[in-house]
Image (cartoon, rainbow, N blue to C red):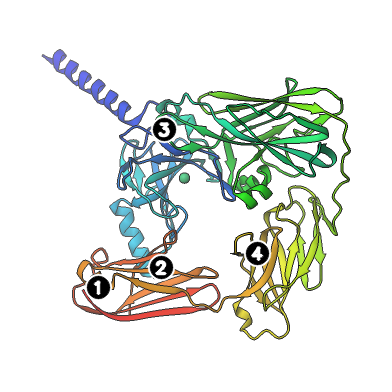
């Protein structure tokens, strides 16, 4: 009797353990966050604007609200709410030494949600960044602790999931814990090859600068003729089974005549490195066409740990009139590999002289350019290679001339300081002045403040700039006003034409009330039901301000 009941308990325990193992995955370090099969819509290290994707994006079957299970024991160490970025996000510190991050959440568990709401009302703010200590919000592996959504800068329901070290600065590819949960038999593929001459030391015969060649069915049909030092770049994507999503390529290897010149592996990186993406990719081509070409060589000053080269930084030296057999291997986390082979024909042709422009900037020193009402300071180590600039001045806005700092191919790591002198007879409050970049299609806001007759901004690309003035208040447009009282949802479209919205605040009968803002679609929303507003007539007031002191006020009596 005793024996058989023990057996039943044992059997139950085994069943329970295997059911849990099934639901939570088999990895010892981390379980899976969902009860349905994992599919990625984005992978680790993918190329994004000014950063590498710092985690993976798990699809959530097209809906918001899927429960998320804690992947290991630990505690919730941080919660944040933002109009853009990760939107609603939770950070969990695990007992195993890792931290995991959950972005674009639909909602928080009640205990956290209550704490956040209290903070928002006490501080009269929508934005939240709260840190918790280890005894406040414990979670156990498998416990539902959040709900996936589409908040922040997200364009479809998914969970942005990160694995970090305990400091939160080092990011790891979550695939190291989830590879067995995903099936992938499809290798990455290239669609185009770029060939770059080394300025002053190499040439792609018959071309003044770099050249791109199509890849058709895995083959480059054209033969490249070159002399001296040349480098390569590749436009490529990765794929997985059962989905139409496209991913970044985890690993590249470049070999010439079977000698490895360059390799890269996106396995981990730190936040300090993430902007180095602009040094790895062909930034000029990206800015002009939006296409990502990844360099298979390294510029002079690129401390990105994912890249490894031979002593020649990955450049091929063509110094004999013969064929050089080059191959580029592309592989993914599951070891699927494709190989792009092409031939470089060594042919003596004249190497153009190094570009000599009016200004030369060096990555290893502090650089100052002082030019007819424009000052540029590029600190040491901020450039990824030496830059040759043709600085020019032309007719600009009514506030300053327009300054051209070379051709937009030079990105800056953290930033350079650009100052432009304001024209003497400007008839606008100088507090409204800012700097904008003149891009191929329209203007890009670059920030900046007026100071002693100049406007000073931190810029991250050596492009074309001028001063502009923001005198336009933000636009606050009520949407479906006739339904406000009926469904209890007050919705505005909030946009700022020239610069950005810097703050917003709503009150009902003079008391703060929580409006939520989503910067991706510019929706500013008050849900009166959720905020426990009593039914009746209320005085609504909404004030929005942009970064240059322009204000818009909306006032109305509403009946709910
Ligand atoms: Zn993501």
Q: Residue 370: which disc?
A: none
Residue 399 position (above or below residue 47): below
Residue 133 visible to an observer of this rendering: no
Crowd class of label 3 (few under 14; some 14 to 19; many from 20; radius 10 Å)? many
Q: Foreground: 309 or 254?
A: 254
Q: Quadrant of the C terminus?
A: bottom left
Residue under label 3, please give it: 30
Query: Where is residue 91 drawn, in percent x and y?
Result: 43, 47
Query: Where is residue 322 drawn, in percent x and y?
Result: 83, 22
Asked if marks 1 and 4 touch (Cβ < 8 Å), the reply is: no
Crowd class of label 2 (few under 14; some 14 to 19; many from 20; radius 10 Å)? some
Q: Which is nearer the N-term, disc 1 or disc 4?
A: 4
Q: Residue 438: which disc?
A: 4
Residue lying at the far left in this picture: please name it: 1
Residue under label 1, please give it: 482
**SS at mark 3?**
loop
The image quarter containing residue 171 is: top right
Residue under label 2, please give it: 125
Which mark lies nearer to you, 2 or 1? 1
Q: Foreground: 99 or 183?
A: 183
**SS at mark 1?**
helix
Residue 36 relative to residue 178: left or right: left
**SS at mark 2?**
loop
Q: CA distance from mark 1 to mark 3?
A: 50 Å
Query: Where is residue 407 drawn, in percent x and y?
Result: 73, 56
Which mark lies nearer to you, 2 or 4? 4
Q: Quadrant of the N terminus?
A: top left
Q: CA distance from mark 2 to mark 1?
A: 27 Å
Asked if marks 1 and 3 touch (Cβ < 8 Å), the reply is: no
Q: CA distance from mark 2 to mark 4?
A: 34 Å
Q: Which is nearer the N-term, disc 2 or disc 1?
A: 2
User: Within 8 Å: ligand 1 and the Cβ of disc 2?
Assistant: no
């Amino acid at each position: 009797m005793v024996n058989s009941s023990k057996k039943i308990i044992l059997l139950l325990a085994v069943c329970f353990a295997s059911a849990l193992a099934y639901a939570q995955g088999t990895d010892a370090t981390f379980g899976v966050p969902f009860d349905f099969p994992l599919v990625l819509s984005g992978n680790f290290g993918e190329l994004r604007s000014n950063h590498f994707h710092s985690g993976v994006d798990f699809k959530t079957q097209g809906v918001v609200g899927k429960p998320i299970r804690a992947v290991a024991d630990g505690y919730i160490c941080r919660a944040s709410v933002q109009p853009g970025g990760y939107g609603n996000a939770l950070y969990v510190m695990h007992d195993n030494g890792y931290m995991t991050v959950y972005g674009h959440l639909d909602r928080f568990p009640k205990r956290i949600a209550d704490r956040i709401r209290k903070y928002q009302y006490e501080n009269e703010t929508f934005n939240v960044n709260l840190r918790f200590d280890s005894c406040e919000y414990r979670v156990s592996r498998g416990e539902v602790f959040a709900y996936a959504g589409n908040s922040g800068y997200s364009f479809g329901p998914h969970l942005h999931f990160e694995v970090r070290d305990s400091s939160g600065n080092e990011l790891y590819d979550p695939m190291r814990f989830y590879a067995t949960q995903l099936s992938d038999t499809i290798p990455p593929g290239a669609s185009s090859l770029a060939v770059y001459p080394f300025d002053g030391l190499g040439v792609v015969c018959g071309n003044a600068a770099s050249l791109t060649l199509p890849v058709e069915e895995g083959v480059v049909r054209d033969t490249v003729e070159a002399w001296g030092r040349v480098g390569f770049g590749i436009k490529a994507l990765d794929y997985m089974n059962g989905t139409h999503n496209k991913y970044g390529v985890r690993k590249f290897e470049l070999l010439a005549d079977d000698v490895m010149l360059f390799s890269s592996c996106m396995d981990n990186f730190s936040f300090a490195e993430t902007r180095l993406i602009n040094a790895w990719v062909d930034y000029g081509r990206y800015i002009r066409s939006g296409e990502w070409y990844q360099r298979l060589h390294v510029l002079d000053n690129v401390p990105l740990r994912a890249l490894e080269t031979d002593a020649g930084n990955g450049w091929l030296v063509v110094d004999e009139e013969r064929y050089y057999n080059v191959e580029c291997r592309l592989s993914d986390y599951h070891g699927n590999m494709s190989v792009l082979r092409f031939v470089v024909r060594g042919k003596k042709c004249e190497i153009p002289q190094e570009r000599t422009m009016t200004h030369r900037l060096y990555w290893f020193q502090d650089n100052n350019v002082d030019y007819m009402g424009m000052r540029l300071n590029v600190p040491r180590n901020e450039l990824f290679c030496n830059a040759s600039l043709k600085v020019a001045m032309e007719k600009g806005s009514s506030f300053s001339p327009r300054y051209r700092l070379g051709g937009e191919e030079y990105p800056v790591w953290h930033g350079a300081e650009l100052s432009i002198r304001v024209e003497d007879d400007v008839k606008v409050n100088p507090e409204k002045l800012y700097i904008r970049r003149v891009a191929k299609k329209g203007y890009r806001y670059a920030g900046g403040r007026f100071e002693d007759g100049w406007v000073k901004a931190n810029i991250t690309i050596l492009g074309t700039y001028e001063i502009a003035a923001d005198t336009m208040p933000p636009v606050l447009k009520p949407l479906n006003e006739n339904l406000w009282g009926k469904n209890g949802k007050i919705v505005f479209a909030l946009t700022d034409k020239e610069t950005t919205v810097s703050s917003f605040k709503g009150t009902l009968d003079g008391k703060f009330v929580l409006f939520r803002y989503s910067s991706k679609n510019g929706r500013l929303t008050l849900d009166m039901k959720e905020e426990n507003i009593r039914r009746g007539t209320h005085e609504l007031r909404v004030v929005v301000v942009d970064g240059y002191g322009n204000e818009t006020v909306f006032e109305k009596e509403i009946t709910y």
